[in-house]
Image (cartoon, helix red, strand yellow):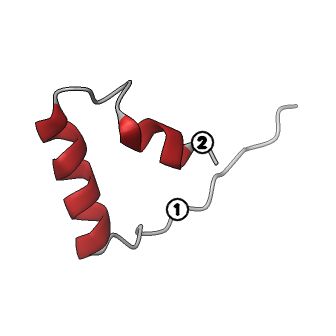
Amino acid sequence: MEKEFSVPMSRPEIGQEEIEAVLATLKSGWPSQGKGWYKTRR
């Protein structure tokens, strides 16, 4: 008999600072290798 597995879900808290960081990354043209990448890895 298999157990049911459930992952609790919640709404993320995304503020203006996070939105601006995403936009800056996309506008840079380097979304996977730009300066912002290192900030998320620390």
Describe residue 25's horizontal placement relative to residue 5 as left or right: left
Q: Amino acid at mark 1?
A: Met
Q: CA distance from mark 1 to mark 2?
A: 24 Å
Relative depth, front residue between 34 and 5: 34
Q: Is residue 12 above or below residue 27?
A: below
* Residue 13, image quadrant: bottom left
Relative depth, front residue between 1 and 17: 17
Q: Which residue is mark 2?
A: 41
Relative depth, front residue between 7 and 13: 13
- Closer to the chain start, of discs 1 and 2, is 1
Q: Residue at x 64, y 48 (%)?
A: 42
User: Is label 2 in a helix, a strand or a loop?
Assistant: loop
The residue sitting at the right extreme is 1
Category of crowding for the residue at label 2, using alpha-carbon neighbours closer than 10 angstroms: few (below 14), some (14–19), many (at least 20): few
Q: Which residue is mark 1?
A: 9
Q: Residue at x 31, y 64 (%)?
A: 18
State the image coordinates of residue 14 (x, y, percent, origin top left). Answer: 33, 69
User: Is label 1 in a helix, a strand or a loop?
Assistant: loop
State the image coordinates of residue 32 (x, y, percent, origin top left). Answer: 36, 25
State the image coordinates of residue 15 (x, y, percent, origin top left). Answer: 29, 75
Q: Amino acid at mark 2?
A: Arg
Check if mark 1's residue and mark 2's residue have beta carbons within 8 Å.
Answer: no
State the image coordinates of residue 37 (x, y, percent, origin top left). Answer: 44, 37
Q: Residue at x 20, y 61 (%)?
A: 20
Q: Residue at x 88, y 31 (%)?
A: 1
Describe residue 14's horizontal placement relative to residue 4 as left or right: left
